[in-house]
Image: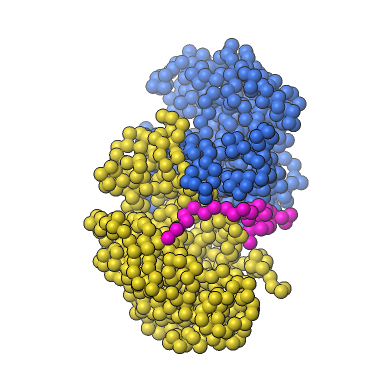
Chain colours: A yellow, B blue
Amino acid sequence: MGYKSDIEIAREANKKPIMEIGAKLGMEPNDLLPYGHDKAKVSQEFINSVQGKEDGKLILVTAINPTPAGEGKTTTTVGLGDGLNAIGKNAMICIREASLGPNFGMKGGAAGGGYAQVVPMEEMNLHFTGDFHAITSAHSLLSAMIDNHIYWGNEQEIDTRRVAWRRVVDMNDRALRQITASLGGVSNGFPRETGFDITVASEVMAILCLATDLADLEKRLGDIIVAYRRDKTPVYCRDIKASGAMTVLLKDAMQPNLVQTLENNPAFVHGGPFANIAHGCNSVIATKTALKVADYVVTEAGFGADLGAEKFMNIKCRKAGLAPDCVVLVATVRAMKMNGGVAKADLGEENVAAVQDGCANLGRHIGNVKSFGVPVVVAINHFVTDTDAEVAAVKEYVEGQGSEAILCQHWAHGSEGTKELATRVAEIADSGVSQFAPLYRDDMPLFEKIETIAKRIYRADEVLADAKIRNQLREWEEAGYGNLPVCMAKTQYSFSTDPNLRGAPVGHSVPVREVRLSAGAGFIVVVCGEIMTMPGLPRKPAAETICLNADGEIEGLF
Amino acid sequence: MGYKSDIEIAREANKKPIMEIGAKLGMEPNDLLPYGHDKAKVSQEFINSVQGKEDGKLILVTAINPTPAGEGKTTTTVGLGDGLNAIGKNAMICIREASLGPNFGMKGGAAGGGYAQVVPMEEMNLHFTGDFHAITSAHSLLSAMIDNHIYWGNEQEIDTRRVAWRRVVDMNDRALRQITASLGGVSNGFPRETGFDITVASEVMAILCLATDLADLEKRLGDIIVAYRRDKTPVYCRDIKASGAMTVLLKDAMQPNLVQTLENNPAFVHGGPFANIAHGCNSVIATKTALKVADYVVTEAGFGADLGAEKFMNIKCRKAGLAPDCVVLVATVRAMKMNGGVAKADLGEENVAAVQDGCANLGRHIGNVKSFGVPVVVAINHFVTDTDAEVAAVKEYVEGQGSEAILCQHWAHGSEGTKELATRVAEIADSGVSQFAPLYRDDMPLFEKIETIAKRIYRADEVLADAKIRNQLREWEEAGYGNLPVCMAKTQYSFSTDPNLRGAPVGHSVPVREVRLSAGAGFIVVVCGEIMTMPGLPRKPAAETICLNADGEIEGLF
């Protein structure tokens, strides 16, 4: 086709020194801690210095339910940020960091794509500025201190069968999912079953992304429930005296990372919690800092709008006092076709009827976002095989829903391809029409919160949960956790809990398998279906072909 | 006493921007990858550009057998480097990086002490530039790929009882010393016993410190033996196809880290392999690069000279084609007293006779170093309680050994306290009297190499090893590993394998418990005694009191 790959485009980027990018935001050289010449952390002193400023406008980019066809949510986030700058606005983007481990299984995820990317792409998919390593270290320290506490006499009387804190590693290592530890006799401790999750699943990750500053971070870390006693009372991280040292390990990781887009516009890339057992958004500190230094901040949330936007609104915005001024919902003609029943192999052929059928999925997301009181614009992320008739069908459908859809060509043309979207989004954000409110009140009973999301967002008929789960929720309410939001962990591929149910299903049930209390992060995780917190490597891992070439460039990562 | 603590002195340091420090060595801003404003990695391009230059002089700082009184080897390394600069020489130092994990057990190790320190001390004891995290990642990737290989059909026919590759984490976590992994059924793999070591014990660490460049690194990683088949043939890392991706993960970690002393002189701090199961020296790439940019390079080796200097000479210098021009042997009056039988509590009292008795330990180290053909100077690292008579006793003893001892006061006075030492060391190094040769030839049989070290360095009568160990060594010789050097793993507290046998014992035996092949690093590990590769945390871990204070400074780490 003659198209350049993402990595080829990224390598040709005309990157500016990161100090120059920071200068656009009013940052002096001493406000930035450089990591190489193209990455930097923003100092806490700088963050403190801008607190008196007015906030810019907050724009959330979310998407339809993901399909194997790809939607380009990050690509659109980058493209919109560049588009806003191109039309003369002072804009920046806030996205999540990538996890290192999974890149050695499947090929790595670029930060955006085509001519809408954030660079340096390779570092962002490897060690970057070390944030995830710091999170792994802080998590591992707590793990070691818990077993050490038990070893030296167990003053807190931890029930070793009820240690809730697992270990983590930033690697896809299925052999560590379930282990028996402390084997080998007296000097190695008390044998017990445990296991490892991948680092992004750590509650430390969720906490780092929700904490407002280092003091809040330490408080939340202390709030983590690490185990239970025989009488079922919780043992907190602070009982093990680990939260101070964990905070020291996370001191630099708390500072937002500044990088740039291919068009040399500023981007914060910071934090990366799972979008199922956690809330799936970049850090609060990055978003809030961005709002102080830019007039428009474009950010994204994980998975489709039913999970990502819902959690962005009900968890991140609620907790951080944020309110989006506009939501951009990304859709593609190809994804509409798949939602309309077309197989991946047949996506190259024009099929307007299938596009029209698939739009039901898009329509429901539009309605859902509006139910938060926030205006929504659909961005049609253009793909070369899209026909005019197919694009017109999406636009027509969206207009029928009382909204508007704009064709975007940032993948091929960078900011030139998003000027129309950027202009409209800025108008809407500036208009003040957004009247954001979370979907449920803090004081609603926990089970009702789950039902509210299931019925109003997933459009399910009912939530199924056995007595054990309902009792557990009531116990947490009695223990003072009733005011927490709920964090739904379900498949991202469907509004329902069945990943094969595309489109806009109705009449389904949402079975709750398990509930977990993330007392430090400050939410109740509601597990509806199989959730994998430690991936495995495939038969032919990407790692087998990743190497340095003769020029010292990385091959095989993308 | 009114003395400032190491951390107080370090915090008062008048640090210069790291770019200025690099400029002293001829490094342009683009030759350095900054990590903050006070740390930087040296680019491979710069390293390539200086290969045509002549080498400076290499000075090794080693010590008597360590005692609880402390010797100050790193402090003297830093003090001597500053002293050389103070007398007008272009000098730099090369030392090892600290492991993060142990700092949460006992209080952290400063990089030097008093007015002879390297800064930034806190970062160097925490994440620093992420090298150890990269090593942990590379090691973990190989671990995951081995079990993944077995999971997907085990094409290499690995005997799962004979997987030699354990896992690592940079944390003191005794609960992970021995585990059963891959539990939980079919989807998690084949259960087997394994365990974790601390990251510094990883063969990847030893390899990174011995590799000359990225190509050599990848080759050595490929050479690692990860398991054996039922027919006892080895399965290599390259059979699992992991070495390319591991090299990608270690790309930046291979570049030396530039920091500075309190007196703003340049220091490379790079690599940190164990000094028992590995060779205990900073990286070859750092030492070799330093020799190209400085006229005098002062480096150190782990533990006392019987382990550290022996391995520096027989492993690092042999493999890297290095030759020391002068050795500085650090001793203290207090340590001499302890070697002379004085208890720690009584070290404050003058005891010339005990000093004289304890000098036997020093004397043997002097003789040992000379046996490598290298001139030796004793540095008496001054402590406030030392009396003139005690110092004189050490000097007199050393002179009787045909060598010289110089009193140094760098802890209290920085370079002012080492000018005499620096002057003498520079004279000796410049004189060209050193006629370095390793202690044994490459082609000597492995068991004879062990005997040579035991008899000529430890002055033991015999090496005890059962038939199994002798057969193993012969098998490795037949497999082509007979030309490797041996890496002795024994207690650092004595010339013998009994840690309580101070002074200069004779007539002892060296029992070999186990031999291990580090085929990637390129040595045979000879284990003589209990070697701990995963430390535990103490009853009251330092972590319990480590925290950030109100000014955002780290408390409790030192």
The foreground one among B76 and A417 is A417
Give the residue displayed 27% in from the left and 61% down from the top. Answer: A482
Residue A86 at x, y percent in the picture? 56, 79
Q: B390 or A553: nearer the eye?
A: A553
- The segment highlighted magenta reads A529-558
Residue B286: x, y in percent? Answer: 64, 43
Locate residue A232 relative to residue B443 in the image: left or right.
left
Q: Is B505 contained in the magenta span? A: no
* Quarter of the figure with the N terminus of chain B: top left
- Residue at the image point whose x is 43% and y is 44% from the top: A194
Q: What residue is shown at x 59% (from left), y 25% (from top)? A: B514
How many circles with numbers are drawn on the protein? 0
For the point 39% across and 22% down, which residue is it?
B345
Whether residue B504 appears in this view of the structure is yes
Q: Does the magenta stretch include residue A544?
A: yes
User: Relative to A326, is A435 on the left or the right?
Assistant: left
Quarter of the picture containing the C terminus of chain B is top left
The picture places residue B164, in percent across and down from the top left corner, at 60, 36
* Left or right of residue A216: residue B342: right
Residue B173 visible within the image = no
**Which residue lies most toward the front here?**
A507
Residue A476 to residue A281: above or below: above
Principal SS element in the magenta part? Answer: loop
Which is more toward the observer, A254 or B357? A254
Q: Is residue B288 above or below residue A532?
A: above
Q: Residue B164, relative to residue A167: is it above or below?
A: above
Toward the viewer: A167 or B34?
A167
Location of residue A89 in the rendering, given as x and y in whole percent from the top left corner: 50, 79
Q: Hey, which residue is sitting farthest top in the picture?
A: B507
